[in-house]
Amino acid sequence: MSESIPRQDGAVILVGVDFGLPHFDSELEELGLLAQTAGLVPVERLVCKRKAPDAALFVGSGKADEIRELAEMHRASEVIFDQSISPAQQRNLERKLEIAVYDRTFLILEIFAQRARSHEGKLQVELARLQYLSTRLVRRWSHLERQTGGAGVRGGPGEKQIELDRRMISESIKRTKERLAKVQKQRGTQRRQRERRETFNISLVGYTNAGKSSIFNALVKARAFAADQLFATLDTTTRHLYLGDAKRQASISDTVGFIRDLPHGLVDAFKATLQEAVDADLLLHVVDASNPHHPEQMAEVQRVLQEIGAGDVPQLLVFNKLDALESAQQPLQMQDEMEVDGVRIPRIFVSAHSGAGLPALRAELASRSGVVTEAMPLDTGAELHDAAD
């Protein structure tokens, strides 16, 4: 793009390539929500079909020219692809388009960097970002020249700038892993303390924006941040949940939401946070019942749960946002069972907004924990952990 063309800060072109894979988002709806969550403004969306990615430009030279024209027309400052692109493709596209080019992985990492509040969350995001950046060094900065060694210095030419950067990032990754290991050890100590108290552990999981934090707040009268946006909550919060006059209490944890194509670096970096799901006695799999794509979202959550080793933990499906369903979509029964991957799982319909179905959910949790439910004030739940600073 010519420098004489003024660019509109935050204006982005969204690009998706249909390779014939199932569940392709032809409207780029989720990518648009991600962009808006990151504070960007989608000004144009472009979808094309290919049998395979172009090795150099991912979309091919003709489509790249079209993207460039759209960027000039809308004065866009960035282009974001719905799929992951290689460092070489990113470099080649930026040279051809003359504006910044990013992919879905980078966008998710940016959102996590903006939203992380706790010390642990920030470390986890930093590690994932460093690992992502390390893969971009080999080709993205290949234009940097070799530095010459000083006069009289033995050993010939000095290191390439890219080698210096790679070593610096490698050292940063090592330091971040060490700091994160200390935080994980502290979390492990807290978890063992709960185990010694024979606490029934419940973990909320689900696709991002399904309403996990709203369910969490409704159950324990907490003040965890909840909003109608993607990744509103990143840091795990655990609280006591009193279910009647039981001799043992439950603890309930709100975890980060899942999303399609969640970067593997984030899955690895968030092992400590997601460990709450692995160690849980029961998973509350929260589903946005009003979202027409909820079957695909459920499948993605199940895939990630298998990946982190929580696939065999008992589940209770909580179909949230009952109040957002049309009258024709309202369930015939508020409680039933649903088959997921060949297994029948109990399901409860609720609305965290109106409170419908929540008494039945509390009763089911009490039954699962082996206690008799009674009405008790829920605002006495003492906070166990809100990600140490």
Image (tube, rainbow, N blue to C red):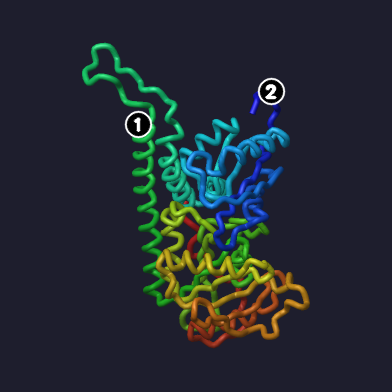
Is 48 placed left or right of 191 in the picture?
right
For the point 29% across and 20% down, the residue is: 157
Q: Position of residue 141 (x, y in %)?
A: 44, 31
In this rendered view, identify the residue nearer to me: 32 or 232: 32
Quarter of the figure with residue 67: top right
What's the residue type where badge 2 is placed? Ser
Query: Where 205 sits versus 91, above or below?
Result: below
For the point 44% across and 54% down, the residue is: 264
Residue 4, disc: 2
- Tell us which disc is closer to us: 1 or 2: 2
Q: Earlier in the sequence, mark 1 or mark 2?
A: 2
Quarter of the figure with residue 39: top right
Query: Where 124 sits versus 12, above or below?
Result: below
What's the residue type where badge 1 is placed? Glu
Residue at image mark 1: 163
In this rendered view, identify the residue nearer to me: 48 or 288: 48
Q: Position of residue 328 (x, y in %)?
A: 76, 78
| Disc 2 secondary structure class | loop
Query: Where 134 sits versus 146, above or below?
Result: below
Q: Which residue occupies the extreme right position in the image?
A: 327
Residue 125, disc: none
Q: Quadrant of the N terminus?
A: top right
